Image (cartoon, helix red, strand yellow):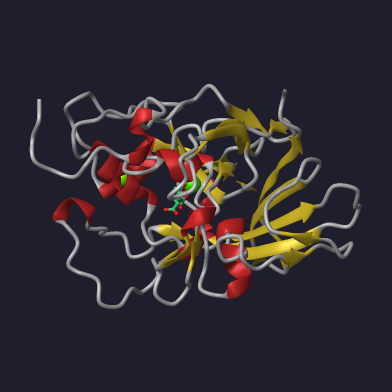
Amino acid sequence: MKVPGPPLPPAWNHLPIGYHGRASSVVISGTPITRPKGLRPPAPGSTEGPTFGPTKSLDMEYEIAAIVGGRGNELGDSLGTGDVLENVFGLTIMNDWSARYVLKLSHQNKTVVDASAFREIQGFEMIPLGPFNGKNFGTTVSPWIVTLDALQPFKTGLPRRENVPEMASYLHEADQKPTFDIELDMTVIAAGETEPTHVMHSNLKHLAYSFGQMLAHHTVSGCNIQPGDMLGSGTISGPEPKSLACLLEITERGTKPFTTSGGKERVWLQDGDRVDMTAVAKRTVDGENANVGFGLCSGVIKPAKV
Ligand SMILES: O=C(O)/C=C/C(=O)CC(=O)CC(=O)O
Ligand SMILES: [Ca+2]
Ligand SMILES: [Mg+2]
C-alpha cells in the first residue's frame, strides 16, 4: 500500500530493520565480549553496497539496571511512580556495550560535518528505529543485586532541570528523594597494559528520571513487567567532562582520542581492552565506614570470529 510520508529508511533494502530487547546475551561480570560483526552502510554518494565486517567503533556505556521483583503488573494494567519499592528488587551495574557509528558531528550545532564516516552498525540500523545488532551482542552486569532497602540511606533528589515543560501526570514523582547518591567509576585497561586508565567518575544522582518514572512509563501502555525483568537506566553521564559515561561522549563521537596510562591513543575499544565499572554508595555511621559497594562489572574484548 502506498501512503504519503517519508521515504523508506536507507537500511530497508539491506537488512530486516527492527528493534528489540532481549535477555539471552545478558552476561555476568568476567564474561568476555566478542567483537560483533555487522552491516555498515555505503558511504553517501557511493555506488557500492553496504560492507560487512567487525565493528571498528566498539563502545561501552555505564548504566545502572533495576531488577524487577515483587508482583509486577498484569497485562493491561499500569504501575505508578510510587510503586517502585514494591516492584524493584534492587540495582546492579550494567555495561550496555555498543557497536557505534563513526558519524562526526560538530559539537556546537550538531550538524553532520563528515557524513562519509557514517558507516557503522548502530548508525545504519537505528534510522528510524532503535538499535538492534548494535547492542545485542552482550550486556554485562555486576555479580550482586543491591536491594533498594540497602540503598534507602542514600536517597536523594532528582537534578534540577531548567525550562522543561510540565511532566505528564503519570510521570509525576511525589517522592522528594526518588533517586540515589551512588558514586560510579570506570577504567579501561588497554591491551598490553597493566595500569588502569581512569576514564569516568559519575554519580547515579545525575539521572534525569527516577526508576519509579521508568517503571510508570514502561507500564503506562499496559505493558506488563515481571520479576526478573531488567530496566537499564541509560548512560549516566554527568555535567562535568570527567563524568561522561561512554566513549561516544568522551571522545566527542570519535574525534578526540584519550590517552591511556601507557601512552596509547584510544578512540574506540580495541581487542584485548578490559573495561571495569564499580559503584559505591558512601557514608560513615558512628565514625565507621558503612559504604555499600556493588562489586565489579568487568569485560574483556575478544577478537571477532572469522
Ligand atoms: O542517539 C544516539 O546517538 C545513541 C543512542 C543509544 O546508543 C541508545 C542508548 O543506549 C542510549 C543510552 O544508554 O543513554
Ligand atoms: Ca544504553
Ligand atoms: Mg510504595
Residue 168 lies, in percent from the top left, at 16, 57
Residue 135 lies, in percent from the top left, at 52, 37
Q: Looking at the figure, which quarter contains the C terminus?
A: top right
Q: Residue at x 39, y 75 (%)?
A: 109
The residue nearer to you, when weighing 103 against 196, is 103
Residue furthest front as drawn: 47
User: In the rendered view, does 176 fall on the left or right side of 204?
Assistant: left
User: In the rendered view, does 157 fall on the left or right side of 180?
Assistant: left
- Kindly tell me whether residue 105 is visible in this rendering: yes
The residue nearer to you, when weighing 253 against 145, is 253
- Kindly tell me whether residue 138 is visible in this rendering: no
Is 243 above or below relative to 269? below
Q: Looking at the figure, which quarter contains the N terminus?
A: top left
The residue nearer to you, when weighing 62 against 70, is 62
Which of the 4 image quadrants contains residue 108?
A: bottom left
Is 128 above or below relative to 118? above
Residue 6 lies, in percent from the top left, at 18, 45
Q: Residue at x 61, y 31 (%)?
A: 37
Which of the 4 image quadrants contains residue 174?
A: bottom left
Q: Residue at x 52, y 68 (%)?
A: 238
Q: Residue at x 19, y 61 (%)?
A: 167
Residue 283 lies, in percent from the top left, at 64, 65
Count of numbered labels shown in the rendering: 0
Is 127 above or below relative to 77? below
